[in-house]
Amino acid sequence: MDKKIMLLFLCCIYHQHTIVSSALQVGFYGNKCRGAESIVQQEVQRWFSTDRSITAALLRMYFHDCFVRGCDASILIDSKNTQIKQSEKDAGPNQSVRGYELIDRIKSRLEATCPMTVSCADIIALATRDSVALGGGPKYSISTGRRDGLVSNPADVNLPGPSLTVQEALKFFTNKKFSLNDMVTLLGAHTVGNTHCSLFQDRLSRFDGSMDRNLFAKLSRTCAARGDPSVSLDQSTSFIVDNEFFKQTRLKKGILKIDQELASDRSTAGIVANFSVNPKAFEQAFANALIKLGNTEVVEGRLGEIRKNCRAFNPSQQKRQPLPPRKSFPPRKPKRPPPRNVSPRPTFSIPFLEP
């Protein structure tokens, strides 16, 4: 073989190997940190044994992280650890996200075993996978090899809200390369978790037939209480990842407007109907959607970093954080006084998984 051709051939092989080795892959830490995934699983199991709501909390964290700047753990950064003294945690939809202490616990064990090896972004993805399985949902393999991002800015947080129509919500998902079926599937995460009355109070102002009459009466009594009570999004199996959510929406028992519209909108009614009678179909679709979500705009290869502390950029990188232009911050709107007997709460976003 001609020497020039041979050289080109070897260069191509090397280039392909470089691309493959830097890409996400199942078992990425196999030779880098043996037992890394077992450590994550052990800590999630330990937390789940005393707090089953952690499944909902981690699903929400996972969605809110991946849907903003991709799965880069930017949601974990504390405000004090940024140059602008604000982070994604300060954005309204993120102010009730929880589960940070579990991520800290996992990271601490991994740092003791394999320093500066396992990214915080991968910890979120793996912990969510394990919590879904513990909650009765599908068991699935997820690729790892993500690196942690270098930016966390509340101005970047733009998530769909609870009172959107199906078509309005779909625009958010298609902008992130998700299909209509992906959107319906991911909203199936509402099979676990709670939401607050303030986020669906408009549905209780008068009975219009869009909600089951008995549920309407029950929620009206609950939400008449002082403060801002919370209710389960799934009124039947609120701690179990199953297809019950879709069954209930077909019976007009969806709590949030967007949830109920999934069953009534012509474009999504068929998907809801299929999931409601075919639990295996939802289980497989949910696993696939979570995997796809985990592959959204990831930082990998030599980009980003592996944080030592999930709540802070590494010192060498923090100095290089660019200050965002002031125009990136939306103008502040005057605050309206909260309704009487209702505590003001931040705006929530899909999937509204309140612990």
Image: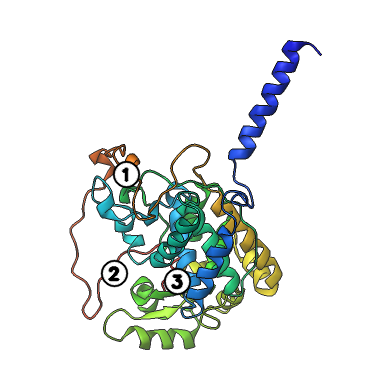
| Image-based side of 63 in relation to 75, left or right | right
For label 3, the crowd category at 10 Å Cα-Cα, with few meaning under 14, some 14 to 19 and many 20 or more, is many
Task: Please name the residue shown 50% across and 75% down the image.
Answer: 46
Rate crowding at label 2 as few (under 14), some (14 to 19) or many (20 or more) other CA atoms within 10 Å.
Answer: some
- Which mark is nearer the camera, 1 or 2? 1
SS at mark 2 in the image? loop
Residue 173 x/y as whole percent: 51, 52
Q: Residue at x 41, y 71 (%)?
A: 354
Q: CA distance from mark 3 to mark 2?
A: 16 Å
Q: Label 3 belongs to which residue? A: 256
Q: Residue 345, labelled with which disc?
A: 2
Mark 1: amino acid:
Pro
What distance separates the C-alpha of mark 3 from that of mark 1? Answer: 42 Å
Check the image and name the residue furthest to the right. Answer: 1
Sequence-first tag of 1 and 2: 1
Q: How many residues crowd mark 1 within 10 Å: few (<14), some (14–19), many (20+)?
A: few
